[in-house]
Image: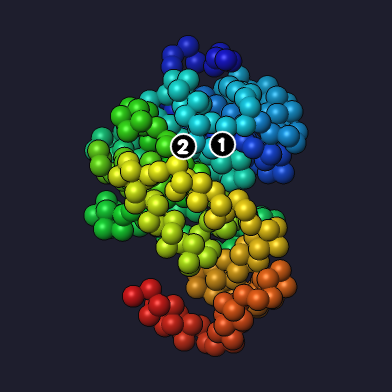
Amino acid sequence: MIHNKEYEITPVISIVMSVYNGAEYLKEAVESILTQTFIDFEFIIINDGSTDNSLEIIKSYADTRIIAINQENTGLARALNNGIRVARGKYIARMDADDISLPERLKLQYDFLEKYPQVVVVGGNANVIDKDGTYVYTSSQLLEWNLIQSRLPHTPFFHSSTMYRKSSFERVGGYPEIYRIEDVVFFNKLARIGELRNLSDVLIKYRLTSTAVTAKSSRSDGVIIQSIMLDAINGSITSAQKEKLKALTVNRSPSWKKSMYHLHISKKYLWNNFQPKLARKNLLKSMYYNPFLLEPLVLLLFSFMSKRLISFIYTKGKK
């Protein structure tokens, strides 16, 4: 372990980031943390068995606040638990290897958690970008605890925007090793011991990739995932259910994943940031990768409607 030489005292914040074959965006992610205005932190980066040059990129940084952990691939939950286990900070800030933290992020969240001791975890809004870094829309997350509580078990967070108390992490037993829903289960367990909140500020640039959207793009799969998630939150998930979760997301063809990715992007251009031409561009790509999917065709027809009518249909559909 590399200790922070600039600070003799224990760092206040431990940023924890797991990396698995994340070389494409890793430098942007790392440098967005190293340029934070709040500097009293340690940055724990777990290389979770990457087969690309992620480890070489991590080693290329001389900043003494970085603590690199190199391990065999274990999956996100165990990698995060391993990193947080050695973290010395009072607060844990999550970061993903394909996202970007804005400069004031740590300062804003630290100040908030210091002011509100009843809050166990705080997130924030995001400028959502696509895989190439192009702006898609700005989120509008629920902010207040009563509103967030009414929407549970739906997670109110971008995972990589969150900061939470290490003591709270330890109290709920850390991240459960359940593929794809480890964060949802974790935050719902935290909700039983304190408040969840979001800042109105944009804290990160959140990158949409094919792996980020495939777990929640299919409605039929979503019903199954929701049922398993509720069992996991209540501590009654079975091994068979864990395997089912993996099968719903891992055992998908590359073309299916690409189709779901472009479908997801197109929805954001219709519902969240009305740009019908960009929506149609992504819908056509979705249809190219999966010509038997009906939803892109329906949305393509919607894309020629007025903004007001599309907004009305979207609002009615959410009720």
Tell me: residue 53, above or below residue 70. Answer: below
Image vertical order of residue 1 relative to residue 113, above or below: above
Q: Quadrant of residue 283?
A: bottom right
- Residue 317 placed where, x, y %? 40, 77
Tell me the residue at 32%/33% (across/down): 172
Task: Identify the residue shown where x is 69% and y is 39%.
Answer: 21
- The answer to whether marks 2 and 1 mark residues whose Cβ atoms lie closer than 8 Å is yes
Q: Considering only vertical position in the picture, is 226 above or below 295?
A: above
Q: Where residue 203 appears, x then y in whole percent?
A: 48, 47
Amino acid on which the number 2 mark rests in the picture: Glu
Cα distance, mark 2 to mark 1? 8 Å
Residue 312 found in image quarter: bottom left
Q: Which residue is mark 2?
A: 177
As rendered, which of 308 and 279 lies closer to the eye? 279
Q: Is residue 109 visible?
A: no
Label ID, residue 75: 1
Residue that appears at 43% across and 59% down: 224
Q: Nearer the viewer, residue 292 or 149?
A: 292
Q: Secondary structure at mark 2?
A: loop
Q: Position of residue 285 (x, y in %)?
A: 70, 71
